Amino acid sequence: MKSLLRYFLSIAILTISVQVANAQCNPDELVNSSVTGLPGGYNFLKSYKIDGEPDLEKIEFSYVLTRGTSYILTLRDRNKDLGTVVTLFDSQRNKVATNKIGSQLASALSFPCNATGIYYIQYTFDPGYMRCGGAALGFKR
């Protein structure tokens, strides 16, 4: 009986600590930092809040991009070193660009759009990193 009580108490503590850790994510300030991080010449288009649960594998958004336009995606997260991987896919789910270069992660992803259509912006997370961040999409012609 005592071991059963300890088991349930351990589960309760673990559940509460996971909920507290998730509650500490404040993507709004990270979104603001991403927007102010857009380089000169780029116009703000859209912001994205990244607030993932510990067992969430990926977060994905879609957006229509226009041919002949250059885009940039700036990214901020809660980790000391950036731990969020951003991958851009075209409408056929072909990888167009990523911020992961070898084992390094860049805090911005710049790319020209070669075809108008729906694109998918996918955020995944390196193991052990917090799933909390913000991103801003900007464009210039």
Image: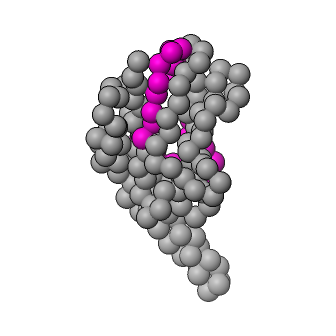
| Residue 54 percent across, percent down from the top left | 56, 56
| Residue 13 percent across, percent down from the top left | 50, 72
Using the image, determine if residue 47 lies above or below residue 15.
above
Q: Which residue appears at 51% of the width and 15% of the height?
A: 68
Q: Nearer the viewer, residue 29 or 76?
A: 76
Q: Which residue appears at 31% of the width and 46% of the height?
A: 33
Q: Main secondary structure of the magenta part?
A: strand
Instruction: Quarter of the image for the N terminus: give it.
Output: bottom right
Instruction: Quarter of the image for the C terminus: give it.
Output: top left
Using the image, determine if residue 88 lies above or below residue 17.
above
Q: In terms of image quadrants, where is residue 139?
A: top left
Q: Nearer the viewer, residue 34 or 50?
A: 34
Protein image colouring: one colour
Q: Is residue 68 visible?
A: yes
Q: Is residue 53 visible?
A: no
Tell me which segment is drawn in magenta.
Answer: 49-74
Q: How many marks?
A: 0
Q: In terms of image quadrants, where is residue 45?
A: top left
Using the image, determine if residue 43 lies above or below residue 106.
above
| Residue 140 percent across, percent down from the top left | 39, 22
For residue 60: magenta? yes
Left or right placement of residue 31 versus residue 98 in this view: left
Q: Nearer the viewer, residue 109 or 83?
A: 109
| Residue 90 percent across, percent down from the top left | 64, 24
Left or right placement of residue 85 versus residue 39 in this view: right
